[in-house]
């Protein structure tokens, strides 16, 4: 699937392509073009209205997987205090589990702290290995189902799960933690796994590296894509000298000044506005300053030397969330890894965007080829 220009704003266009990337099972391309002219600027209520309308149409026609993806998009930019945020998520869940073939997967609730982590397992008949798969900043585990269905034919069983701050756990009150070895450990314990492959998508590129640093049951780890430092990803969009001053203000604890600067930035940039709104939601912070302090903990700078596993790093040369220099910084820091392989996808590959949206099958081909090479 090619990466297409549905709307002018970069982040809005990425979300269109995020649905389109899953192909005809997830959407009708004509319907995306139908709503695109009405979504040329960042207005969460308009975004909700258009995607919700498509979802209700798909429901009426019995296209349950299309409806699920459209409901997912409808909730994407809604603030947490709007009732549509929860209702759209519930509609997404209802439509997804109505659409998905329940014979192809098992559903689990894994005990964790005072609640549980949801997970689904999709078995392969060949059993070359088990891939634990999770998202990052904003994904639901069900979004990876269509990807996993195609990869199990290559011989790998999938366990897809949500950790704190994601999907169902977030709605149950669990906020995101950088200590990702804890939810991963709970999943490994539940399935009695002593050897597994861990793949983290988007911010999951940091989370997976973090978990592998503290759990030797993870034998191979994939950062899809690389997030060496989440705070640097956020400030990468700021011009100098503002970028340097912003970091100095945070380190100096100038909360009021940071909050004022953040409000000014978000008023001028839709990507900053969404990142702040969603970031405070998933971390449970009440101000931009507190969010930045939390975000600064999401980096692999101090734990990369603990990695002893085989590592695969993926990156896109035009990733609008994660600067490509994260790839080089992460690769150089893995001095004790058993092996390190990486690939920066280009426009020629059609996979140069964040998480290779535009050609996600190519990303999975890279992952599977790497695993097969390791297991020869």
Image: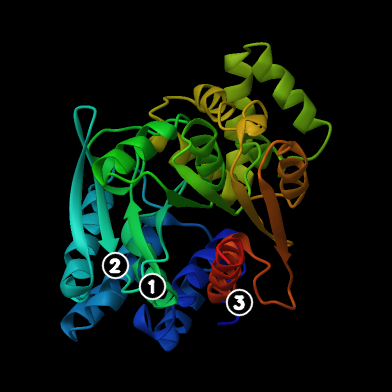
Question: Pointer 2 and pointer 1: residues touching (CB < 8 Å)?
Answer: yes
Q: Quadrant of residue 53?
A: bottom left
Label 2 sits on residue: 123
Label 1 environment density (alpha carbons within 10 Å; few <14, some 14–19, many ≥20): many
Left or right: where 112 falls relative to 362: left
Label 3 sits on residue: 3
Question: Pointer 3 and pointer 2: residues touching (CB < 8 Å)?
Answer: no
- Residue at the right extreme, as displayed: 241
Looking at the image, tell me whether mark 2 or mark 1 is earlier in sequence order.
2
Residue 265 on image: x %, y %: 64, 38
- Distance from disc 2 to disc 1, alpha carbons, whole Å, reads 7 Å
Residue 342 on image: x %, y %: 70, 57
Q: Quadrant of residue 55?
A: bottom left
Q: Quadrant of residue 107?
A: bottom left
Considering only vertical position in the picture, is 93 above or below 331?
below
Question: Pointer 1 and pointer 3: residues touching (CB < 8 Å)?
Answer: no
Checking the image for residue 152, the label placed there is: 1
Tell me the quadrant of the picture where the C terminus can be found. Answer: bottom right
């Amino acid at each position: 699937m090619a990466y297409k220009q549905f709307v002018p704003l970069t982040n809005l266009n990425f979300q269109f392509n995020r649905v389109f990337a899953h192909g005809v099972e997830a959407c009708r391309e004509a319907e995306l073009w139908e709503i695109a002219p009405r979504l040329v600027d960042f207005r969460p209520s308009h975004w909700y209205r258009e995607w919700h309308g498509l979802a209700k149409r798909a429901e009426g026609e019995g296209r349950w997987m299309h409806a699920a993806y459209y409901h997912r998009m409808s909730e994407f930019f809604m603030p947490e205090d709007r009732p549509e945020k929860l209702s759209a998520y519930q509609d997404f869940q209802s439509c997804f589990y109505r659409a998905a073939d329940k014979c192809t997967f098992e559903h689990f609730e894994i005990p964790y702290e005072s609640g549980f982590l949801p997970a689904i397992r999709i078995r392969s008949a060949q059993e070359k290995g088990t891939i634990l798969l999770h998202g990052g900043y904003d994904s639901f585990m069900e979004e990876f189902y269509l990807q996993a269905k195609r990869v199990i034919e290559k011989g790998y069983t999938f366990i897809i799960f949500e950790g704190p701050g994601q999907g169902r756990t977030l709605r149950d009150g669990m906020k995101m933690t950088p200590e990702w070895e804890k939810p991963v450990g709970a999943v490994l314990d539940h399935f009695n796994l002593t050897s597994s492959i861990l793949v983290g998508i988007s911010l999951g590129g940091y989370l997976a590296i973090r978990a592998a640093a503290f759990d030797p049951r993870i034998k191979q780890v994939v950062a899809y894509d690389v997030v060496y430092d989440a705070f640097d990803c956020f400030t990468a969009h700021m011009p100098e000298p503002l970028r340097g001053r912003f970091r100095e203000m945070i380190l100096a604890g100038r909360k009021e000044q940071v909050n004022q600067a953040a409000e000014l930035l978000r008023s001028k940039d839709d990507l900053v506005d969404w990142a702040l709104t969603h970031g405070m939601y998933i971390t449970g912070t009440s101000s931009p300053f507190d969010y930045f302090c939390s975000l600064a903990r999401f980096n692999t700078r101090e734990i990369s030397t603990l990695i002893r596993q085989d590592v695969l790093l993926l990156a896109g040369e035009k990733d609008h969330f994660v600067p490509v220099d994260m790839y080089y910084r992460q690769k150089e820091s893995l001095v004790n890894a058993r092996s390190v392989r990486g690939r920066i996808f280009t426009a020629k590959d059609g996979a140069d965007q964040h998480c290779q949206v535009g050609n996600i099958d190519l990303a999975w081909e890279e992952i599977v080829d790497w695993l097969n090479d390791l297991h020869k």
